[in-house]
Amino acid sequence: MRSVERAAVVTHGHTRNVSSAVERLRSVAASASVELLDAKSDAAADIAIVLGGDGTMLRALTRFLGTGVPVIGVNFGRVGFLTAIPGDDLETGLARVFAGEYRIVELPTVELGLDGERHVGVNDAVVTSATMGRMIELGYAIGGEDLGVQPCDGLICATPPGSTAYNLSNGGPVLVWGLDAMVVNFVAPHTLHARPLVVGRDVDVVVANRTPDVPAGVLVDGHLVAHLAPGSSTIIHLGPERSKLAILPEQTFFTRYGQVFAPG
Amino acid sequence: MRSVERAAVVTHGHTRNVSSAVERLRSVAASASVELLDAKSDAAADIAIVLGGDGTMLRALTRFLGTGVPVIGVNFGRVGFLTAIPGDDLETGLARVFAGEYRIVELPTVELGLDGERHVGVNDAVVTSATMGRMIELGYAIGGEDLGVQPCDGLICATPPGSTAYNLSNGGPVLVWGLDAMVVNFVAPHTLHARPLVVGRDVDVVVANRTPDVPAGVLVDGHLVAHLAPGSSTIIHLGPERSKLAILPEQTFFTRYGQVFAPG
Amino acid sequence: MRSVERAAVVTHGHTRNVSSAVERLRSVAASASVELLDAKSDAAADIAIVLGGDGTMLRALTRFLGTGVPVIGVNFGRVGFLTAIPGDDLETGLARVFAGEYRIVELPTVELGLDGERHVGVNDAVVTSATMGRMIELGYAIGGEDLGVQPCDGLICATPPGSTAYNLSNGGPVLVWGLDAMVVNFVAPHTLHARPLVVGRDVDVVVANRTPDVPAGVLVDGHLVAHLAPGSSTIIHLGPERSKLAILPEQTFFTRYGQVFAPG
Amino acid sequence: MRSVERAAVVTHGHTRNVSSAVERLRSVAASASVELLDAKSDAAADIAIVLGGDGTMLRALTRFLGTGVPVIGVNFGRVGFLTAIPGDDLETGLARVFAGEYRIVELPTVELGLDGERHVGVNDAVVTSATMGRMIELGYAIGGEDLGVQPCDGLICATPPGSTAYNLSNGGPVLVWGLDAMVVNFVAPHTLHARPLVVGRDVDVVVANRTPDVPAGVLVDGHLVAHLAPGSSTIIHLGPERSKLAILPEQTFFTRYGQVFAPG
């Protein structure tokens, strides 16, 4: 890639590690004559640097969706599946990035339409019971075929980067980066038949709240964006935008995968 | 068993089927000279008759816990795992019950202690995130051994009758009636290590809310009984009471199990 | 599609239903002036008609791989996930097919290379312990990244049609027809970390037998094609050929999916 | 416990670590005036010392079943779930054991009857397809109730110590030591309904090979003990003998469980 002249900085704000990490970043940037911008700045950055974990990566990828600015992470969180550089390697890693040594992985997003509004998620869209301890009944149709009503706690539509998040906690498969697909997976389905399902682009998942008396919440990347009243429905599919995740040239999905899923 | 002289009646109240079912019950009771009592009556019943599904059975078993009154169900619900008599067989089934043709299965309960109060569940005790879309971190210790902190949506302790309910939706095993055990199972654990665990009587499960900023709800048989503030904890184990489930003499756990888990 | 002039017939040979089914097929073919060919014939057919279940469909799809002849199934088996026409609807279904009322779904295949030979599967390639009751240790690399050694009973690479077969029995996800992907899934992995993984085209899965003393068997679509001696390895990826599955115009993957995975 | 005068020694024979481990054991035994016996000796030992992993523990527990001799393990294997003393702590651990500082956990065994012969397993009994790549159809009845025929790779009945072995690899739950129960679990069931099932003492599991043309193998603790011809059946239940596992006084099931299932 082209070497970096201006970099936006994103931190999650309230970790003790961050202020020293920002100092270290400033020092590397100064050496490489890279100008650092605030993430909220309107000035165009060549790349966004995240100091944090997967939560901060998610926020940054969403912030820069559609801008063409790729996002690279230095891990100061727990798992850091989406980050490219371990915290200890900040200096060497960012020096390489500033010199243009990185590549961009484009990842599909998930788009949810409800009441004429659209919401785009980097990781996942979830329809879930809004009443603690109450199951909901979700009607669902995939690819135009009505698949009935499923009593459950919720339904997840996850992108490849989202597949290793909430989807995985609910028994769903891992989707490798590069796949133009999403996984449709129920949360605590109260039948014996439900299985995770992987669908491609241009497949609509329509989810309706069929519970007479329990409202559903609609979450995109873990944030509540709307409620789904009894009787109403939402459409979920892969979105037109792509997340631009930057990683070091020698890295692949399987580098991180191996560390997490095939250790020792 | 001794033949029945007085039977308490429990219905779930708002189903269209129930009023005709109650009529049919009255008719059978009259033929057998059985006096029908309201479930809330203080008069001693020989048995409680449930017209409904598993939810109503659960409520009735809880209502009569510690009273010595067994509970038998006529299924007007969906699955009816705990019921003994299909709705269509109400007349022949209850005539047999009134003549003393039934037997009692004693089932362990789950007891939860919190802030000096105790709560008893027929099915399960659940500690769960009280904020929609927010994971919680639960510290847990079993049998006196600290097992660390698990990021998850919740933790279930289920009795044998509860094992086929919410526990099963979360990948837990079925515990056969007769087993004096409970299953400890996480809801959407965000690690790769968690597995359902079956423990016996006299094993304490201590669950602590280790999330700094997310309160947890404590549910017993699906009802919210308390909150677990960040930093506080609760103790869960098998309780001293036993649910008294009445079934027809020829029935076993596997009769219903086969219909649900091994159809065709 | 163009109307049918010549149809190849494939049956699984030893079912009592088949001879009467063949009679019925002959009658429909005669009415539509369609010439019936033996499946082994070298004459070019417009379509292949299967009378049987998923096993016979699998055999027929393999037989006609690379020939351009699509395969349509009339179900005389148990599940019949790949068949388009219920046995009872043979006459009306085939009359439509002969009139050109069908469409073709192209499905990816799986290709396995070993000792200079290649094997192509419609459903799946499996590397499995060849000694009953003995676990094997499989080394594996995906996309060029070494992911270590996994003690297990075996490893499955399944196409979308194969995803609802052996992969599903081992907890893997369902891949919708249309997806150009395969699922990599362990059989009885003896660790806590293994999860099903969905990979796209051009991703190589290299599997090596790392057990000193247990040979592995290599199965393609359930047939043993080779052994994998201790120390040797095989490469598995999506193959260049596509299975040509014919279905009725109004049918989709979700038609059959709904009947099996979301009944009632 | 009483202090040890005579200890039987069991090793798995072909590990490079073992000869030095035996030397270290001899030295500790000499200091404590403990006589070491060969495991095959007929002389009565107070305890059996295993130098090895779970496989050697299993063999030793089986060898001493019914003799009253408890078995304690020093871990020179990989997981060592059943061992009490890490390899590095051999000297301090065995000095305590020889001084009587240990306690005994009694664990249920599994008993399998076939053709008038009985076989007893410490971990599990498995009925499995004897033909690589061929599914079998197993008829099964539990507690006298016929539960139909299940197409699958096999069926496992596992004791609590066996629950963390092959059962766990197949999605079964962990049964805590102390539970008088076994788990019944299918291997790769080809339906959507099968779930692991935990049953107590005095529950018979009858397994019949209902495949016309595929023989089944019967394995006890991983060793092939018989074949189950098409049409014939076997009975499996908890056995009258108990394994006597010795551990250090401060240890519980959850000590090892926490290290394996709740690390970090």
Image: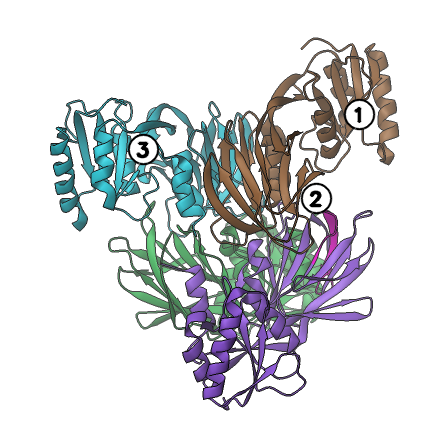
Chain colours: A cyan, B green, C brown, D purple
Chain for disc number 3: A
Q: Position of residue B190 (x, y in %)?
A: 39, 50
Instruction: Tell me the quadrant of the picture where the C terminus of chain D can be found.
Output: bottom left
* Residue located 45% across and 87% down the image: D31
Q: Which residues are magenta?
A: D127-146
State the residue position of label 2.
D133
State the residue position of label 1.
C10
State the residue position of label 3.
A247
Q: Which mark is residue D206?
A: none
| Circle 3 Cα neighbour tier, 10 Å, few/some/many (<14 / 14–19 / ≥20) | many
Identify the secondary structure beneath mark 3. Answer: strand
Q: Is residue D131 above or below residue B224?
A: above
Q: Is residue C46 above or below residue A45?
A: above
* Residue located 82% across and 66% down the image: D115
Q: Amino acid at mark 1?
A: Val
Tell me, yes or no, whether dots 1 and 2 are on the same chain. no
Q: Amino acid at mark 3?
A: Ile
Examine the structure image and report whether residue D133 is included in the region drawn in magenta: yes
